[in-house]
Amino acid sequence: MTWDGKVHHNSHSTLMQSIGERLEEARKRRGISIREAAETTKIRSDFLAGFEENNFDLNLPEIYVRGFLRTYAVLLKINPDKIVTDYTATLLGESKSRKESRELFGRMELQDRSRQSDLTSADGESDAPIEAIESDEPRAPARSPGGWKDLINFDNTVYLKIAVIILSGVLVVAVLIWVIQAIVGSGGSSSASDTRPAVTQGIDSEIINLIALDEVRVKVTEIDGGDVLFQGPLARGETRSVTKRGTILITYTAGANLLVEKGGQRFRMPTEGIGRSTFN
């Protein structure tokens, strides 16, 4: 068999392409520029260019990166589920590689420590016979110039200092408790009277419905207080009721797939792709 000098492509070659190569090839095949793709998807052009260079570090939560990749893949008419799955596999591979590196360094460090301990024990064993040859008489324990009396006096001084520190701490805690009780006792009645009107002036709650025209991930947050009222995916045709108080912030991955119903009226999101909107 002779080689004809040509490169033959088969179906297996597409499996070897990276995510960026597939996106770039699909965009060029459709004759779309990065700028045109950014205007259509409402995704920054530098994000799209980074995707085609296999750079997915956008300093954003993973849900936004996956949403951007899915939206871009839909525009380029390639399988969005395959792109997102390959991206997730890439993240898992990087995490596994970092874990293996840490384990390798840990094993090397343990080996070094074990080697050092073996050397230390070997030195100790070689010194023991020399001490036995130098003198057969038992050695008395070393004492300080002042003898055992100075050692006992030193221990008593340390114990006395520790006892003084403990007593001082107990007195400080007791004084703080007394001061707090005095403040609470004097201001208790006024605090109670001040908080009662606030309860009666609370904002009335109301219920809105999140309606999914297709798959979409939604997060609903109260502007006042920052409480998360709902966060999660909605399947096609699913309706989720949310009780809110005051103005809320709705974040979504596909605005074209989400409707908000309030008082019998339905409202569309201002952005078809990923975005956020306030709702009174």
Image (spheres, grey):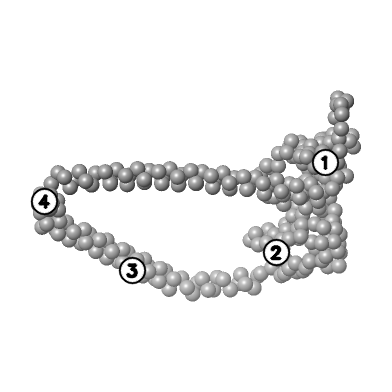
Q: Secondary structure at mark 2?
A: strand
Q: Residue furthest top?
A: 5
Residue ID at (66%, 69%): 202
The earlier-in-sequence mark between 2 and 1 is 1
Task: Sort mark 4 into few (<14), some (14-19) or many (20+) by Cα contacts within 10 Å.
Answer: few
The alpha-carbon separation of the residues under discs 4 and 3 comes to: 59 Å
Q: Secondary structure at mark 1?
A: helix
Indicate whether 42 appears above or below 259: above
Q: Please state which of the two labelled residues, at mark 2 or mark 1, is closer to the viewer.
A: 1
Task: Sort mark 2 into few (<14), some (14-19) or many (20+) by Cα contacts within 10 Å.
Answer: some
Image location of residue 41, percent across then percent down: 83, 44
Marking on residue 137: 4
The alpha-carbon separation of the residues under discs 3 and 1 comes to: 77 Å
The earlier-in-sequence mark between 4 and 2 is 4
**Circles 3 and 2: CB distance less than 8 Å?**
no
The alpha-carbon separation of the residues under discs 4 and 2 comes to: 82 Å
Based on the displayed image, in which of its 4 quarters is residue 235 positioned? bottom right
The alpha-carbon separation of the residues under discs 3 and 2 comes to: 43 Å
